[in-house]
Image: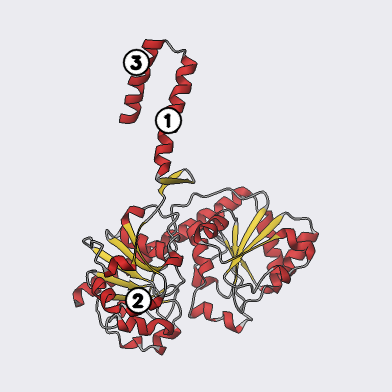
Amino acid sequence: MIFIFHKLLFIKYVRKKIKLKKIKILLFIILLCLMEKNKILDNNILYNNLIIRKEVEKYDLNDILNFNYTIKKNNILIFEPHAYHYECSPGYAKYFIDLGFNVDILMHKNGSDSFCLFQHKEKIRLFLYYDISQINSFYKNVSDFMNHYTFILIQTISEKRIETISKLDLLNKRKVIYVFHFTYYYDKLNFTKIENQNRIWTLGHFSIGLQVVPYYVGDIKLKDKNKKTRFFTVSTISRNYNFLVSAAKKLKNENLDFQVVVVGKVRKFSSKNINKNLKANFLFNYRVNFETLYNMVDSSDYIILTLDNKNKKDKIFKDKKVTGAAQLSYGFVKPALINSYFKDNYNMTEENSFIFNKSNFYSVMKKAILLNNKNYKLMQKNLLETTKLIYNYSIRNIQKTLDSILINL
């Protein structure tokens, strides 16, 4: 308001002195507004008509070693000891911010752009390392740094990083919360000995711990369905894509307009798996950064979860693991195509998703392509309601964890 008031006074003065015509004054106002907008965008990005701060405040491990930082009050540290799972970091940070905490994150540099769409960058700080050997070499300094925090969340527990976690004395601190992406490690690493089991989190409806689903990436604006229907899926190890390729061939022969965007860390599914007639219908990308990944998901209509109940290696995604593609579905409000065997673990129904089995995947994919925009928006609305339920029970579980830790400290 102050900016507009000053500009109007200035315009009044200019008009009086040089008697500009109304049309020139209007153009002058537009120019001034554009100049002001450019000032804003110097430090921010415009995404879906939302102004988002460009960069998160970042430090590196040397800042920790040289005590070049301050610790804010009411603080939480998220520590990811792996070079992956950074699609989860914005979601965990959002829950803690909503509960009134300041959030610092110690992460591998690979995850530094996972907050590109995050709405509250001023509420978080990133402390970046370049290799886990850095943490191991200076574990005493890092452990001292961690002691300043009220709570610590270890974002992924695995056998590969248990030595590092032990070195940092994070197995003996009562303020530490442990996230299991794969429940196998809960028994394997003897976490049954943890007295306060509320400090155990999982991402699915599993038999251990409390479920907390970190799906948030930013305040996403719902979009209309594309004229050319766009599916998004992930190339991963040990997955069967034959039923997708077979369905795509039939849909192509029917002259239906669609594209499948494939992203992954591995080239399990690639252009080698399809014939030349389908080349225009598939777009393959590998090892993309988070900003590119998010743009690809956001510009798609659906996410295909290629889980197959006939594949023994996929069955763990029903009761022991979750697929990150489901979190992208929630976070970007993109309806999923999912095998009926897995749907319950992901809160997916006929109202918010397309449910298939291998024998009818073609007809389900065709139905998704032919769905009109009105019914697509209704499906999105239903999925958005599902994410609200997920948010509510997740944040209740977080509060339950934090309350139980404070009682036992």
Inter-mark Cα distance, 1 to 3 = 17 Å
State the image quarter where residue 61 is shown.
bottom left
Question: Residue drawn 28% across and 74% down?
Answer: 142
**Residue at (31% x, 80% y) in the render:** 197
Q: Is residue 46 left or right of residue 125?
A: right
Residues at marks 1 and 2 touching, judged by CB atoms closer than 8 Å: no
Closer-to-camera residue (242/112): 112
- The tag earlier along the polypeptide, 1 or 2, is 1
Residue 260 vertical placement versus 37 (above, below): below
Q: What percent of the width, then of the height, locates residue 49?
A: 47, 43
Q: Amino acid at mark 1?
A: Cys
Q: CA distance from mark 3 to mark 2?
A: 62 Å
In percent of the image, x 48 and y 80: which residue is there?
320
Question: Horizontal placement of 74 versus 361: left or right?
Answer: left
Q: Earlier in the sequence, mark 1 or mark 3?
A: 3
Identify which residue, 114 or 94, lies in the foreground.
114
- The residue singled out by tag 2 in the image is 135
Element type where label 3 sits in the image: helix
Q: Earlier in the sequence, mark 3 or mark 2?
A: 3
| Measured Cα–Cα span from mark 1 to mark 2 | 48 Å
Element type at marker 1? helix
SS state under label 2: helix
Report which residue position mark 3 lands on: 13
Label 1: which residue?
33
Estimate how packed mark 3 is, as few (under 14), some (14 to 19) or many (20 or more) residues with alpha carbons within 10 Å: few
Which kind of residue does numbered mark 2 sit on? Ile
